[in-house]
Image (cartoon, helix red, strand yellow):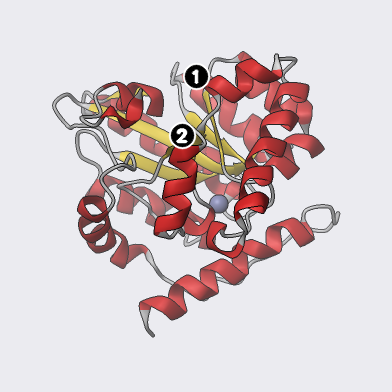
Amino acid sequence: MTLATIVARREEALSQIARKIFKTREVKVKATMQLAPLIPLLYKILKPAFPNCLWAGDGSERSLALTFDDGPHPQYTPQLLEVLERYKIKASFFWLGICVERWPEVAKEVYRRGHWIGLHGWNHRSFPLLSDAELRQSLEKTQEAIAAACDLDLQQVRRTFRDVRPPNGLFVARTLKRLRQWNYRTVMWSVVPEDWVRPGVSVVVQRLRQQVQPGSLIVLHDGYCGGEDVAATAAEVIPWLLEQGDEFVSVDQFWQSFPADFSS
Ligand SMILES: [Zn+2]
């Protein structure tokens, strides 16, 4: 199976989120792909190729950023918040606008607890498939949903909530150019244990334990794909990371040690 096929299948699985999100029955996404073994390789290739994206911290201290995509979700996100609260961990959340609009109270609670908020597009459509106008609207509409959900001034949200993680990890050069032009910051990752295909909590935890190092930017999911396990995964891996002496920081703190002028 080629990398393009794997990415295309992931794209298809995740793009179903928007269509399925308002149905009441449980959504099952078939675990047809195993991208996890390729991620460390992809990271090594992509990071130097796209230096204006945030891929990790500088690694000079034992700091980690724990990030969660695809939420907020009415069940999985509150479960996760409890675990983060138990260990006094601040994390970063990359939200889908459609979910913020659907579950504003959950979004508000995440924000109230002091977590860092970023954008993941309105409905998880891959950015390269959108026109410039659609991409911009997807992000601005998500900011509007956040402002309404969290009782915040829209201009403040536009200035502060400008970290963007492209859905499915997909972008083209034009995407990055536009995001930068519109004053957004692109956030990628260094550790992706592929929890969205639900390989089991122990597998996800094992991948994290093998791959995490100082400065790691970790991606997990609290939405429809993988969110069922996110609280259990966090409850297992956070104590272990704390034992290693790791400190948890937001992606904003990673930007502050970013070498380029891009972070300003
Ligand atoms: Zn996603």
Element at label 2: helix
Name the quadrant of the C terminus: top left
- Left or right: 147 as drawn, with respect to 117: right
Between marks 1 and 2, how big is the CA–CA gap?
9 Å
Q: Earlier in the sequence, mark 1 or mark 2?
A: 1
Q: Disc 2 beta carbon < 8 A from ligand 1?
A: no
Q: Residue 204 at x, y = what percent?
A: 40, 53
For label 1, the residue is 86
- Residue 235's disc is 2
Which amino acid type corresponds to the residue marked 1 in the rendered image? Arg
Whether residue 234 is visible to the viewer of this picture, yes or no, is yes
Identify the residue shown where x is 17% and y is 32%.
59
Q: Nearer the viewer, residue 78 or 164?
A: 164
User: Number of labelled discs?
Assistant: 2
Q: Amino acid at mark 2?
A: Ala
Image coords of residue 121 (percent x, y):
62, 46
> In screen coordinates, is 127 left or right of 202?
right
- Rendered location of residue 28, percent (x, y): 68, 65
